[in-house]
Amino acid sequence: MNGLKGLASFISEKDNIIIFVFAGINICIFIASLIIRAIGNSIRYPKGELITGTGARVQVSRKTGKDLRGIGRTLLVLYQIYANLTAVFPLLGIMGTVAALITVAESSDLMANLMVALTTTLNGVIWAIIFKCLDAVLSAPLDSFLGVVDSVENLLEEAGKGDIEIIDDNAKVVSPVAGEKHEEETNA
């Protein structure tokens, strides 16, 4: 039982610091996700490499598909870490509350322990609310971006079955059937 009280004492002293460290990590993940999404958008909308529209043909390069797939996977992993860390904040607040209340039993300073209990709970809830609001900024564009990645992957799979052309990295059209390069340049 002394080990549990010692752990509770340590947690009640360090819980606010732990909450702020987790908040810093989550902020870094959020910023990294925004940067990677911007990089993905620059690949998604290059100077004519991925051409889609209402016309009868679609052009896409395998390199674009591969790059978008990698960025999409990275964004998905970062988002999963972000969402799981966000869910931990209320638990950290409750952990600080319980730890502070456990230490009340052997301490005569009741008000100090209750203040630790209340501040850790408040910090956990505040950070959870902040990151849940930021989640709205991150999740909708991520879903949209992953939809584009799926579309590009589907286009690459369907190449040669219709009006979809694969272009190489030099903007030369590669025949979807024979793999031969056409002499004419595509609109870049």
Image (tube, helix red, strand yellow):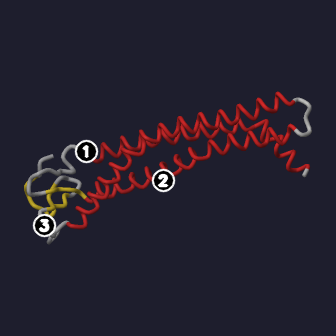
Sequence-earlier tag: 3 or 2: 2
**Mark identifier at residue 45:** 1
Q: Nearer the viewer, residue 105 or 28?
A: 105
Label 3 Cα neighbours within 10 Å, binned few <14 / some 14-19 / many ≥20 = few
Position in image of residue 73 (x %, y %): 42, 55
Q: Which residue lies at the image location 51% right of the left edge and 42% below the top edge?
A: 29
Q: Amino acid at mark 2?
A: Val
* Quarter holding residue 65: bottom left
Q: Amino acid at mark 3?
A: Gly
* Vertical side of 112 occupied by 147: above or below: below
Gap in angstroms between the C-alphas marked 1 and 3: 23 Å
* Vertical side of 6 occupied by 184: above or below: below
Is residue 122 shown left or right of residue 172? Answer: right
Q: Which residue lies at the image location 55% right of the left edge and 41% below the top edge?
A: 26
Q: Tell me the element at label 2.
A: helix
Q: Tell me the element at label 3.
A: loop
Is residue 119 shown left or right of residue 10? Answer: left
The residue where tag 2 is placed is 77
The residue where tag 3 is placed is 162
Label 1 Cα neighbours within 10 Å, binned few <14 / some 14-19 / many ≥20 = few
Q: Amino acid at mark 1?
A: Tyr
Sequence-earlier tag: 1 or 2: 1
Is residue 17 shown left or right of residue 139? Answer: right
Q: Which residue lies at the image location 14% right of the left edge and 58% below the top edge?
A: 173
Q: Nearer the viewer, mark 1 or mark 2?
A: 2
Q: Which residue lies at the image location 41% right of the left edge and 44% below the top edge?
A: 36
